[in-house]
Image (cartoon, grey):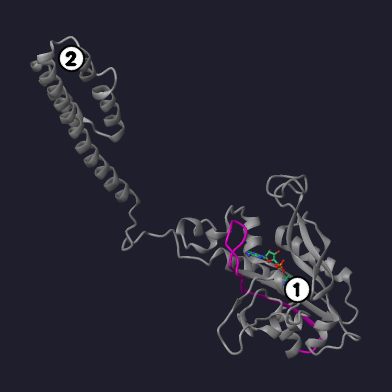
Amino acid sequence: MFDELEQVTSTGVERVRAAATLEELRSVEQELLGKKSPLAAFNQRLGALPTEERKEAGRRVNEARTVVQNAIAERRRSLAADERRQRLQAERLDLTEVIPAPGRGHLHLTTQTRDELEDVFIGMGYQVAEGPEAEDDWHNFEALNMPPAHPARSMWDTFYLDLGEPETVLLRTHTSPVQVRVMQSQAPPIYIVAPGRVYRYETPDPRHLAVFHQIEGLVVDKGISFADLAGTIETFTNAYFGPGTHSRLRPSYFPFTEPSAEFEVTCIFCHGDGCRVCSQTGWIELGGCGMVHPNVLKAGGIDPEEWTGFAFGFGIDRLAQIRHQVDDERDFLVNDIRFLSQF
Ligand code: FA5
């Protein structure tokens, strides 16, 4: 019996050492130590031995099992290390490697979208305006008809900067303060778009970023009406998404416009029939808009009795995400060449 046991042990250890993968090792382990293994059979045979022999035989069977178990543990360590090495090798990025690029690099998708939108609006007679990203409370909130402690301020989660009086300087939460800056610096008629980066104290998710881009539109002229706003949105969505796209306005609330609306476009994937992208509604929401509130015109130094205007604002990244069916907007920020090179 002991010769047989030694034979089983040594062939077992050989088989363990020959296992080429962790998967294979697992099945060898089952064969060598499982319920139907030769070692288990030895255990059953112990019962038939006379008492005086049983003790020594039991010790030898346990010893054989320990030898096989140790061999398995050692092989497992070595295979795991090999597999890890191979995985690291496969995932390794050689940052010194020069990959012959198919061409030169190109602008980020967000910048391409911003440029394209600017072109559409310039074609409609608008000028491009800019404002600071570190903004004061007055331009970001107060001049937009949100005095301190106005409840509507909670619509925008704000990063305040540690500058001047507490809560007086912030990272702008939207591009709307540029409206006020433009009104302060130029006399009507005004036809501008203001694209730029904005910041919100938000947890990023597939449709929200804490740092993203908006484009703001502002028109102030004589006799501007809600119909002009609707027509402008229809014209620009057609120019950007192509003919056959329609827009609609739905009542909403912004403190700086009255009346206010959200604007939507017919889903560019199902053309209004209803699909997964538009949650079967046939429409996709793009942004907010409305007639500039008289208080905002006054804050900008413009007489609301003489001039009227409309404004709109929407997410540039969100627009690109919709058009290119990007599942997760956070991909815009990770700088992964495999994502960026698709656009
Ligand atoms: C505003 O920011 C208003 N200033 C828009 C406006 C301008 C209304 C002028 C009226 C007149 P809102 O918070 O809803 O509104 O944001 C507008 C758009 O920005 C959204 O429709 C969406 O396209 C985009 N957006 C908002 N939050 C995020 C975010 N966290 N990440 C990415 N895009 C966002």
Q: Position of residue 307 (x, y in %)?
A: 87, 84
* The magenta stretch spans residue 161: no
Q: Position of residue 223 (x, y in %)?
A: 91, 79
For label 1, the SS is helix
Q: Quadrant of residue 244?
A: bottom right
Q: Quadrant of residue 31?
A: top left
Where's the N terminus, which quadrant?
top left
Q: Height in image: 29 above or below 76? A: above
Which region of the structure is painted magenta?
Answer: 186-211
* Residue at the image point whose x is 58% and y is 58% from the top: 205
Q: Which mark is residue 46?
A: 2
Q: Position of residue 121 (x, y in %)?
A: 72, 72
* Residue at the image point whose x is 36% and y is 59% from the top: 99
Residue 78, visible in the rendered structure: yes
Q: Three-letter amino acid code at disc 1?
A: Pro
Q: Height in image: 342 above or below 174? A: above
| Quadrant of picture, ligand 1 | bottom right
Q: CA distance from mark 2 to mark 1?
A: 83 Å
For label 2, the SS is helix
* Residue at the image point whose x is 65% and y is 81% from the top: 130
Q: Which mark is residue 151?
A: 1
First in sequence: mark 2 vs mark 1 = 2
* Residue at the image point whose x is 21% and y is 33% from the top: 72
